[in-house]
Amino acid sequence: MQKHKRYLQAVLITFIPCYLFWLLLTMSLDAKELLMGLVVCLLAAAFSANFFSQNGARAFRFLSPLRIVRMLVFFCGVFMWELWKTNCSMVKYVLLGKPFHQAIVKVEVKGIEGDYGLAMLADCITLTPGTITMDVAQEDGRTYFYVHWMDMESGDPEQAGELIKGRLEKWIGRICA
């Protein structure tokens, strides 16, 4: 019974943002649109609930007001600032034709546990210009990202990791804790 309850919670927590996104995309309050969205989003939630919410008992924790505020501050402030900085640094390569010093860097991830946080950090690193997260590896109980860095500024792995991750890791750790 407990497993069934967790699954229903996972379906609900997956359905709500999916249906809100449907409403945002259709921008219609027509009964047919609302019903079709309900059916499609409910089916999508039923099939993907375990994937998006691996632990249904804690599924609703992502809807806590504190987490939502942290995500807004992160995405609208911290991430946008990091994105701006890296975009500006890429301008010198495009306009000045400065040569690249490409490398694949092994970056240790600290303070983030769980697939959601790791995926969020990997995506944020990849979204910033000049870096692509290529792989995630578990070695000796630690998590590492292999990141292709377009302009390697430091040969020291610890310093390189800090340059690549910036403040992203700390904020994502707070959001997903």
Image (cartoon, grey):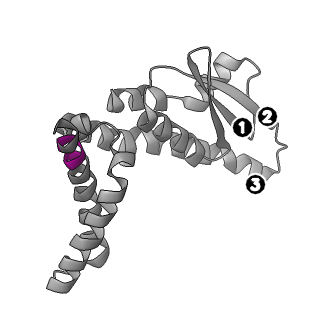
> Which residue does the numbered mark 1 point to in the structure image?
149
Farthest residue, direction right? 99
Percent coordinates x, y for residue 130 in the rendering = 68, 44
Residue drawn at the location 53% of the way across and 29% of the way down: 166
Farthest residue, direction front? 1
Magenta-span inclusion, residue 8: yes
Percent coordinates x, y for residue 88 in the rendering = 61, 46
Q: Which residues are magenta?
A: 5-9
Three-letter residue code for mark 2: Ala
Quarter of the image where one finds residue 104: top right
* Mark 2 or mark 1, earlier in chain: 2
> Residue 68 versus residue 51: which sits nearer the camera?
51
Q: Secondary structure at mark 3?
A: helix
Residue drawn at the location 53% of the way across and 44% of the way down: 123
**Disc marking residue 95:** 3
> Which residue does the numbered mark 2 point to in the structure image?
103
